[in-house]
Every structure is written in C-alpha cells, then in structure tokens.
Image (spheres, rainbow, N blue to C red):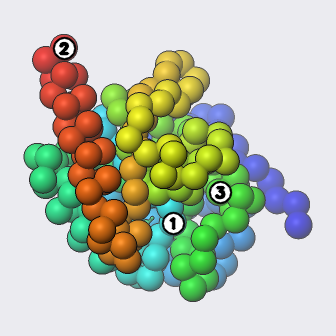
Amino acid sequence: EDVAPPVLEGIETLAELEKAVAAFEGCPLKRTAKNTCLRAGARRPRMLIGEAPGRDEDLQGKPFVGRAGKLLDKMLAAIGLDETSVYITNTIYWRPPGNRTPTPQEIGSCAPFLARQIELLRPEVIVLLGGAAAKSMLETTEGIMRLRGKWKLYHAKERDIPTLATLHPAYLLRSPEAKRYAWRDLLMLKERLGELEKD
Ligand code: URA
C-alpha cells in the first residue's frame, strides 16, 4: 500500500518535528500501537538510538522505560550519564505487534523523521543500540558483532557525526555473557566524551 512520505518542509525545531510525527499516517504500525514513543531525556547532544518501542514504551509513550531501559540506565550510570544528559529515541516511533523486529519498510517510513531529529538535535555522538539501529544508520547489512565497538561516521546533511554501535540492552538481558563487549564499548564512549569535554 502506498502512503505519503513525511513532509519535512517547515520543520525547524524539535517541537515542530514532534507535532509532525504525531500527525503522520505513513507508518502502518501507528494503527496498532497505543502511543507514539519519540524521545526520552533532555535535548542534549548525546543521542542514543534503539530499535523499537516495546510493551511498556507503547503504554507510556516514551522510549526505554521497560526492562531493557532499566539496564540501559545502569549502563549509562556506569560511565556517568543519566537521563538528563542523553537524548534517546528509536528507529521507529511505534511498537510492532508482539515486539517483532521492525521491517525495513517500517524503519524506512520513519527514517526521514529520524534524520531530521538528528539534524535538529546536532548530537556530538550517536550510540546505536543493536543491529536494527546500526544497520539502518550505517546503511550496511553487516551484523552487530562486526559493527560494534568501532567509531563510524553517520553522514548528516551538514556534517558527519561519529557513531558507536553496541549491543542492545534487551540482548544483554538474554545473553549476560555478552556484557563484556558492551562494557568495552561503553568505555570507548566514555573516553570520547571526555575528550569532547576538553575541546
Ligand atoms: N527496546 C528498544 O529498542 N527501544 C525501546 O524503547 C525499548 C526497548
């Protein structure tokens, strides 16, 4: 089924973007989801992108408020970050039924908004949580185990933004033995943020 792509002209602030997402009918998931989950946290230039809202996120209309979110909070706290110092969103704004993986078409339907979110936020770094975000933002089909732990550039309209892919907290809940990789990635992030603070 053909749907109109998002109209981004005239969107100059994050508040305007949020209004436009709320009015958008081009992502079929909106019909089955309870809420739009667009962002959590402050409008600060450190951005995290996850996969998709789950049950708790759909109920509360906010990304990463469920079990995976609790683990994410702990991971961020371990390197001195909290909800007030990061901006969290997902590759899509609506929950896929039964938490299935979003399709490329669903991710594609929200991608122009996500790109604009990034342009307006101007993050200094972007952390990509899990394969869906990493593959979509880095435009690759490589697996998350190959993509994680490396700084790679995301080409935004006006500039390139360093991104760091890591394992998704929901995956870490299922496979706690993989936490050591995520920990290495977090230390890379901490080091980079420390350097940026010196600039
Ligand atoms: N998993 C995600 O990728 N995003 C959320 O918001 C919650 C769980």
Q: Residue at x 52, y 31 (%)?
A: 154
Farthest residue to the top: give it.
199
Percent position of residue 191, x then y: 19, 31
Q: Distance of mark 1 from mark 2, alpha carbons? A: 34 Å
Label disc, if present, on residue 52 of the rendered structure: 1
Q: Position of residue 152 (x, y in %)?
A: 47, 30
In the displayed structure, does residue 79 sit left or right of residue 118? left
* Mark 1 C-beta to ligand 1 under 8 Å: yes
Q: Earlier in the sequence, mark 1 or mark 2?
A: 1
Task: Give the residue pinned by disc 3.
Answer: 107
Mark positioned earlier in the residue sequence (1 or 3): 1
Q: Which residue is mark 2?
A: 199
Residue 128 visible at all: yes
Residue 48 in picture, x, y percent from top left: 37, 48
Residue at x 54% of width, y 79% of height: 99
Give the structural element (helix, strand or loop) at label 2: loop
**Tag of residue 125:** none
Task: Look at the picture and state if 105 lies above or below 166.
Answer: below
CB of mark 3 within 8 Å of CB of mark 2? no
Between 132 and 185, the residue placed more toward the observer is 185
Amino acid type for the residue under numbered disc 3? Ile
Outermost residue to the right: 1
Q: Earlier in the sequence, mark 3 or mark 2?
A: 3
For ligand 1, give the image quadrant.
bottom left
Along the line of sight, the residue nearer the viewer: 41 or 78: 78
Q: As displayed, is residue 70 above or below residue 56?
A: above
- The residue positioned 54% from the left and 74% from the top of the image is 95
If the image is split into quadrants, where does the N terminus sit?
Answer: bottom right
Which amino acid lies under the numbered mark 2 shown in the image of this protein?
Asp
